[in-house]
Image (cartoon, grey):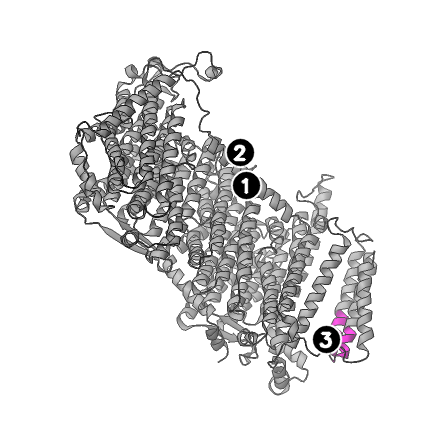
């Protein structure tokens, strides 16, 4: 199995890497891997149906419980056949669908890459394996929806789809991790065999459902799917009807037999599923674009299957499996047929198409057959599956939620029949309903496309949809063996559903009566609304608008927040840092740092008191100074006074250093001040004096108090004593400060020298570049070379 | 073996000196710089292999006993960071030469860059708190020179913000270091754990907070982050690439080191809150921008949040996730800036309004962007997913629901901003002015820059592919880091 997935990855890369050169051979080449997979699955099927599930595991990161572990069970077999079978057909179909384009290598590579990832989802046994492939399909789906990246609609639709499914994916990730932790396992099959319970598990399952609902485009996350129709039709047929949107169903189908009774599971899936069923149904009736109508129909059908598979009783699970197969066949056939129509007639607008029955008889036939299957009209497989579904819902034994599901499904199916008729008639009817006469929208409708303006599709182009449509009938006629096969496949997710069976004719019973009523009701709904001309504006719905509003609000909010925090004002930033320091020190003092301050010795000598007072006075004078020059001199003065304090404390070296530094600083100041304005620039308006003074005093007081506490807290001896002891005997120097600087801690000195050297280099560089820019400015002869990011001095605002 | 440790610092320093002397010859400067960077990387690799086999390596500078000397210490964590760091420095150096960032206007590029290299090695290897401070200063000065290399108004403006805030940070750090010395009588990181443990709670808390503020500012965590987005985007691309990838992570390294070694028994709820806020504020900043470089700069902040989250959660599992996160993040972030550099070089802009349709001109470039971008957003199968999975798993295991919610929401918003770049710059119609440039690939015009970018992106893929053994290494490193006794025993024999 790993080999097959790697083959998909490999062929994906082979198609992607050479870029434009691969355009011609990429599509057929890409079909090889899915075709081989299909063959392998067929060869494995009898073993799998007898309960021998091939497994394989590669450990990726053991510490995180991350493995790539695969297991081919019945559901994996069914879905694998759908994924690889339809994948092969779609790739072959694409060779005819697309004319000569130079980006088909990209398309083929992404499609086959997607096929591999999708196989990974349906075969995944590792909890995190599932997530890895899940997100891979989201990524490839994003790139495929945005395939026509010159269209802004396609770009935003791609992004919307990615963000919705990606967001759901994150919920899924959290859910899967929690399930793994609760069940102490990394494997889905082990988790289901020995299910954990508790609040955490309930939370986890809701999270998993969130993932499944987003991926399967269920209400309220359904809106991304119609938008995804911006992708080329083969992509829509494959990803957004037959396979990827079923990923959520696959997860639900696996978990439901075990976890459906837990917490709100059933109510969640049933309400989301029914809402999608109904909303999708209504929307599908109001589209002019046949492909969009089908897309809304897909939302609706996915809702139907979500209800069935989510209820998790043996009968509904079995019926759900049958629906999975039926839907994949008829929906892919319909999409591909619409693609043929679009290709031949140049439009998918049902208001413009005329006389397809005569001009495209094969395509028209396929549309009729597949529509019949979608509307559950005998003898198609869609009918057989829906009979089973109704039957399974008649007595699900899950209480009220089961009855709600039944009523909802019957009503939703009426809509299904109605929109199916509408689409079929819209595509094929000679006098298409919905052509407005005096409506304002009539202007949109251009000249009808009749038989004369068509060109006929080739046989190869038609092969894929014909095969799929034919299977819809063949499986319907051969319902018994197919039903037997499905029962054995379904047994892998719920052993109790092994007894399920499918029949084309089950006698006159409740499901049949219901089916007839649904078809009649659907026809009636269609008939009463046939003249309704209201069509919806492309893929935009309330949910899409809400999403876009939320997205815009997020961007606007982010912008406001950033403008507020990122003011570009350096004094503000410094204020924030200093406030943080003061708050931290205050916290420490409150937490007891002040307790270690005992018997403080205020003075060492009588001279200190006036010295310190004078220093403080000078510091205050610095603040009061209005001119830069005065402030610099006063600052130097307080520095000199501090040096005297050092001297009194018995540190002549330090005092001398301080004197030198102060002198040098004042000299540099004076040199620089000559080129600066005389007065300080005014303080920024947001920081009145009391704020600045407050922050400064808070920092000074808290840091000083904490410093006092910290220095009183020491009990251990200082390393300084070792230095003094070792200085003369071991290092051979009588001045311990010198020895520290050049020997004990000489390495620090090396670093500090480097700092000075680099700082010097930086200054030289700045001076030179300033000169260079001046020269360039002169050369540019008056042309202002203003930097667009503003003048350097603006940071002081 | 132990003699190799100082060489990782001394070789680039000596190279810087030679480079200064050869300031008139760009060829000599280049040769010297490349030789030194290669040598440093080779030393780092040797150290990491040796340390993994034989345990922590130490070097006492000046040959004094371990308790008196300044020690250089390489355990698995610092050796790993040293390796990743010096590899990135080498890669970006080659890229910069390809971009001619070292042209005649900026002769100071090579000396400053080599000093930066020495500073990075020193910061990772320092086993003494004051020595750590010194190397932070070395880094600061060297990075300041690099930031203002071209001396344009914009660079001086952002350089001012950068240097002033970082000098404030130095003040806080040196205060913290001085007070730690006052309270314990030593700066030796092997002796400190025991002495700090003996201090009263309030004092220990205050010292810890001082260090956290200082390193937090370096790492750009909430609320000390503002300097970063105001300064990084102004730097030349190869410079911002190495800043973005490496410098903030040195702050994170220092946080991890001090939190685990010096203050192991601390309530880190506050730090967890800081982590959440850092993630959120960074990503909000990112989605508000419409310039590639600025978006990417805000993401540095947001991503730091994940690493701090790992530290705040604590324990071997969380620390190993943090270490892996750092290991993955450094090359990913670097490569994003490298791609940005190619875009800017080719189109003359990094603003999304002015760049469009790049994918049509070079699918390769699009792939080179998309891989690290999706990795940054934490999507599988890329390395970022593994890092995120690590921290999120631990948080879920500890039932810290809110931080998980924040972390996941932030990763979705990361995706939003990455898609914004991809949608804006790579999809759509190529700009008319760029179409005339012909259909030949963008990458072929800039062979050295492209080569380096491809190599770094391949490196990130390799990190994902070989995540199993790498993660095991990170776990061993985390075990080293959380085991204070082994650190002390290695230094003071």
Residue identifier under label 3: A654
Quick check: is A753 in the magenta stretch? no
Residue B142, given in percent of the width and then of the height, sits at: 61, 60
Q: Chain of mark 2?
A: B
Magenta stretch, overall SS: helix
Quick check: is A647 in the magenta stretch? yes
Q: CA distance from mark 2 to mark 1?
A: 28 Å
**Nearest to N terminus: mark 1 or mark 3:** 1
Task: Give the foreground label among 2 and 1.
Answer: 1
Give the secondary structure at mark 3. helix
Residue A780 in which image quadrant: top right
Along the horizontal axis of the image, is A148 left or right of A492?
right
Q: Contact (CB < 8 A) between labels 2 and 3? A: no
Residue identifier under label 2: B431
Give the secondary structure at mark 2. loop
Label 2 and label 1 in one chain: no
Residue B409, given in percent of the width and then of the height, sits at: 48, 47
Q: Residue at x 25, y 43 (%)?
A: A75
Residue A250, given in percent of the width and then of the height, sits at: 31, 42
Residue identifier under label 1: A554
């Amino acid at each position: 199995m790993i080999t097959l997935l790697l083959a998909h990855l490999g062929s994906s890369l082979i198609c992607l890497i050479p870029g434009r050169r691969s355009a011609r051979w990429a599509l057929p080449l890409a079909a090889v891997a899915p075709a081989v997979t299909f063959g392998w699955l067929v060869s494995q099927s009898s073993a799998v149906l007898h309960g021998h599930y091939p497994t394989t595991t590669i450990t990726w990161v053991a510490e995180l419980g991350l493995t790539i572990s695969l297991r081919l069970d019945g559901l994996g077999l069914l879905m694998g056949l759908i994924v690889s079978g339809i994948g092969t057909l779609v790739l072959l179909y694409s060779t005819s669908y697309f004319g000569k384009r130079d980006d088909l290598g990209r398309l083929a590579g992404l499609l086959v890459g997607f096929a591999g990832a999708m196989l990974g989802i349906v075969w995944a046994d590792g909890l995190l394996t599932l997530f890895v492939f899940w997100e891979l399909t989201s990524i490839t789906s994003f790139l495929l929806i945005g395939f026509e990246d010159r269209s802004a609609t396609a770009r935003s639709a791609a992004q919307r789809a990615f963000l919705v499914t990606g967001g759901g994916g994150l919920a899924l990730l959290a859910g899967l991790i929690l399930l793994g932790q609760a069940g102490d396992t990394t494997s889905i099959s082990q988790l289901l065999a020995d299910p954990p319970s508790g609040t955490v598990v309930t939370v986890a399952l809701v999270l998993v459902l969130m993932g499944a609902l987003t991926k399967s485009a269920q209400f309220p996350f359904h809106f991304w799917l119609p938008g995804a129709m911006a992708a080329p039709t083969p992509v829509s047929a494959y990803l957004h009807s037959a396979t990827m949107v079923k990923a959520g169903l696959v997860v639900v189908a696996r978990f439901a037999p075990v976890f459906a009774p837990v917490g709100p599971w059933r109510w969640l899936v049933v309400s989301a599923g029914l809402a999608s069923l109904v909303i999708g149904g209504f929307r599908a009736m109001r589209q002019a674009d046949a492909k969009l109508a089908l897309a809304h129909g897909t939302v609706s059908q996915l809702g139907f299957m979500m209800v069935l598979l989510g209820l998790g009783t043996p009968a509904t699970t079995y019926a759900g499996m049958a629906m999975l197969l039926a839907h994949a066949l008829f929906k892919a056939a319909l999409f591909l047929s619409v693609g043929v129509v679009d290709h031949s007639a140049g439009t998918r607008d049902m208001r413009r198409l005329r006389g397809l029955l005569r001009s495209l008889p094969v395509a028209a036939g396929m549309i009729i057959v597949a529509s019949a299957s979608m509307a559950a009209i005998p003898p198609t497989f869609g009918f057989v599956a829906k009979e089973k579904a109704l039957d399974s819902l008649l007595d699900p034994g899950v209480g009220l939620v089961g009855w709600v599901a039944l009523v909802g499904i019957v009503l939703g199916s009426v809509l299904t029949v109605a929109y199916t008729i509408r689409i079929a008639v819209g595509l094929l009817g000679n006098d298409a309903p919905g052509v407005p006469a005096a409506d304002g929208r009539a202007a949109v409708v251009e000249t009808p496309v009749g038989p004369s303006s068509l060109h006929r599709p080739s046989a190869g182009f038609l092969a894929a949809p014909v095969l799929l449509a034919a299977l819809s009938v063949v499986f319907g006629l051969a319902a018994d063996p197919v039903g037997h096969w499905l029962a054995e496949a379904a047994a892998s997710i719920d052993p109790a559903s092994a007894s399920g069976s499918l029949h084309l004719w089950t006698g006159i019973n409740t499901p049949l009566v219901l089916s007839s009523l649904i078809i009649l009701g659907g026809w009636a709904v269609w008939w009463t609304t046939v003249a309704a001309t209201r069509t919806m504006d492309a893929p935009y719905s309330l949910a899409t608008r809400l999403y876009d509003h939320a997205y815009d609000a997020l961007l606007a909010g982010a912008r406001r927040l950033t403008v507020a925090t990122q003011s570009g004002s350096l004094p503000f930033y410094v204020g924030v840092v200093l406030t943080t320091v003061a708050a931290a020190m205050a916290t420490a003092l409150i937490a007891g740092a002040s307790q270690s301050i005992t018997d403080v010795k205020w003075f060492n000598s009588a001279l200190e008191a006036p010295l310190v007072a004078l220093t403080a006075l000078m510091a205050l004078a610095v603040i009061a100074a209005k001119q830069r020059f005065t402030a610099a001199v006063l600052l130097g003065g307080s520095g000199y006074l501090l040096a005297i304090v050092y001297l009194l404390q018995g540190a002549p070296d330090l005092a001398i250093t301080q004197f030198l530094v102060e002198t040098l600083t004042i000299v540099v100041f004076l040199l620089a001040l000559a080129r600066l304005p005389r007065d300080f620039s005014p303080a920024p308006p947001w920081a009145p004096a009391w704020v600045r003074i407050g922050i400064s005093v808070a920092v000074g007081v808290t840091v000083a108090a904490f410093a006092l506490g910290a220095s009183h807290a020491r009990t251990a001896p200082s390393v300084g004593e070792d230095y003094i002891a070792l200085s003369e005997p071991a290092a051979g120097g009588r001045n311990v400060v010198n020895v520290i600087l050049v020997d004990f801690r000489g390495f620090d000195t090396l670093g500090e020298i480097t700092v000075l050297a680099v700082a010097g280099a930086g200054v030289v560089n700045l001076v030179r570049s300033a000169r260079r820019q001046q020269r360039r400015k002169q050369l540019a002869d008056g042309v202002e070379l203003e930097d667009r990011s503003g003048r350097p001095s603006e940071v002081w605002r | 073996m132990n003699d190799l440790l100082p060489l990782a610092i001394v070789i680039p320093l000596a190279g810087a000196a030679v480079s200064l002397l050869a300031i008139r010859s760009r060829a000599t400067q280049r040769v010297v710089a490349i030789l030194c960077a290669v040598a440093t990387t080779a030393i780092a690799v040797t150290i990491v292999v040796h340390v993994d086999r034989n345990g922590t390596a130490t070097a006492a500078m000046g040959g004094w006993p371990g308790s008196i000397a300044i020690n250089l210490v390489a355990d698995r964590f610092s050796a790993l960071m040293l390796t990743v760091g010096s590899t990135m420095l080498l890669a970006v150096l080659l890229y910069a030469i390809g971009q001619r960032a070292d042209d005649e206007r900026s002769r100071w590029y090579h000396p400053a860059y080599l000093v930066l290299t020495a500073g990075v090695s020193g910061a990772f290897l320092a086993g003494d708190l004051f020595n750590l401070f010194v190397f932070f200063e070395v880094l600061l000065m060297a990075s300041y020179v690099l930031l203002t290399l071209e001396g344009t108004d914009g660079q001086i403006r952002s350089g001012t913000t950068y240097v002033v805030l970082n000098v404030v940070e130095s003040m806080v750090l040196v205060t913290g270091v001085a007070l730690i010395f006052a309270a314990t009588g030593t700066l030796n990181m092997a002796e400190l754990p025991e002495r700090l443990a003996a201090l009263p709670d309030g004092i220990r808390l205050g010292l810890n907070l001082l260090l956290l503020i200082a390193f937090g500012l370096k790492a750009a965590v909430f609320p000390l982050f503002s300097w970063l987005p105001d300064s990084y985007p102004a730097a030349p691309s190869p410079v911002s690439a190495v800043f973005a990838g490496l410098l903030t992570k040195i702050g994170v390294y220092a946080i991890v080191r001090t939190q685990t070694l010096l203050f192991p028994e601390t309530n880190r709820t506050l730090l967890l809150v800081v982590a959440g806020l850092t993630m959120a504020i960074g990503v909000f900043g990112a989605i508000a921008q419409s310039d590639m470089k600025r978006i990417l700069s805000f993401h540095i902040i947001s991503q730091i949040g994940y690493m701090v989250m790992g530290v705040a959660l604590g324990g071997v599992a969380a620390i190993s996730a943090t270490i892996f996160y750092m290991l993955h993040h450094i090359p990913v972030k670097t490569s994003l800036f490298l791609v940005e550099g190619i875009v800017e070089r080719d189109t003359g802009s990094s603003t999304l309004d002015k760049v469009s349709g790049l994918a049509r001109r070079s699918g390769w470039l699009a792939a080179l962007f998309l891989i690290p971008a999706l990795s940054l957003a934490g999507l599988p199968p890329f390395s970022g997913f593994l890092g995120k999975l690590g921290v999120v798993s631990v948080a879920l295991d500890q039932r810290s629901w809110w931080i998980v919610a924040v972390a996941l929401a932030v990763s979705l918003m990361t995706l939003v901003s990455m898609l914004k770049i991809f949608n804006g710059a790579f999809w759509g119609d190529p700009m008319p002015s760029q179409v005339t440039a012909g259909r030949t690939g963008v990458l072929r015009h800039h062979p050295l820059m492209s080569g380096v970018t491809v190599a770094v992106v391949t490196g990130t893929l390799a990190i994902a592919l070989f995540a199993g053994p790498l993660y095991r290494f990170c776990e061993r490193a985390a075990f080293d880091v959380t085991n204070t006794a082994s650190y002390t025993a290695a230094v003071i024999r």
